[in-house]
Amino acid sequence: MIVNLTPHSCTLVLGNQNITLPAPARHARVEQKSTFLGNLPLGNALGAEYHIPIYDNEYGEVQGLPPVKQGVYYIVSRMVAEAAWDRHDLLVPNDTVRDANGRIIGCRSLYRVIIHDEEPLPASVNSDLVKSTP
């Protein structure tokens, strides 16, 4: 059994048949805390100086994820699957199908996330920020 825990319906495109799993009343998500760092200058465009706000996002616990249940798999966002990397029952939409306007209308497969160690961002990234409010 597959249960959709994303905030929107999920259409599985299986050959010439589409199966749509409706959006749940309550979806799985990762807690997020954003901290404003400053504005990054973009330079002069159209006679005006532009800046883009830069934030640090800190992610916490997964919310709305039911316990593991034999024979049940959950479709979740990649972020949820990465945060709950030790769960083997979480699946993420893969091989997306788009309409003529480029909007995602479904997926042809699902995948499991495998996490590898990653390098942190260099400290020099923060030195490029202009400290001001958004």
Image: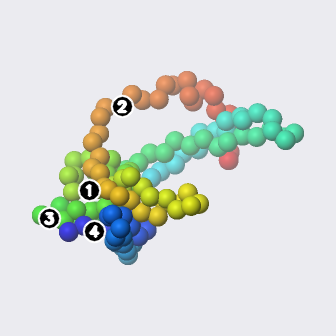
> Residue 92 sits in which quadrant?
bottom left
The image shows residue 43 at horizontal and vertical percentages of 76, 33
> Residue 39 sits in which quadrant?
top right
Is 45 in front, or is 65?
A: 45
Going from N to C along the chain, the mark reached first, 2 or 4, is: 4
Label 1 and label 3: CA atoms lie apart by 12 Å
For disc 1, the marked residue is 90
- Secondary structure at badge 1 equals strand
The image shows residue 90 at horizontal and vertical percentages of 26, 56
Label 2 and label 4: CA atoms lie apart by 30 Å
- Secondary structure at badge 3 equals loop
Amino acid type of the residue tagged 2 in the rendering: Glu
Q: Which residue lies most toward the right here?
A: 47
Label 4 and label 3: CA atoms lie apart by 11 Å
Going from N to C along the chain, the mark reached first, 1 or 2, is: 1
- Specify the label residue 71 is tagged with: 3
Identified at 47% across, 51% down, the residue is 33
- Secondary structure at badge 2 equals loop
- Specify the label residue 118 is tagged with: 2
User: Visible in this render: residue 109?
Assistant: yes
Which of discs 2 and 3 lies nearer the camera? The answer is 3
Q: Are marks 1 and 2 in contact (CB under 8 Å)?
A: no
Identified at 38% across, 52% down, the residue is 95
Identified at 54% across, 45% down, the residue is 35
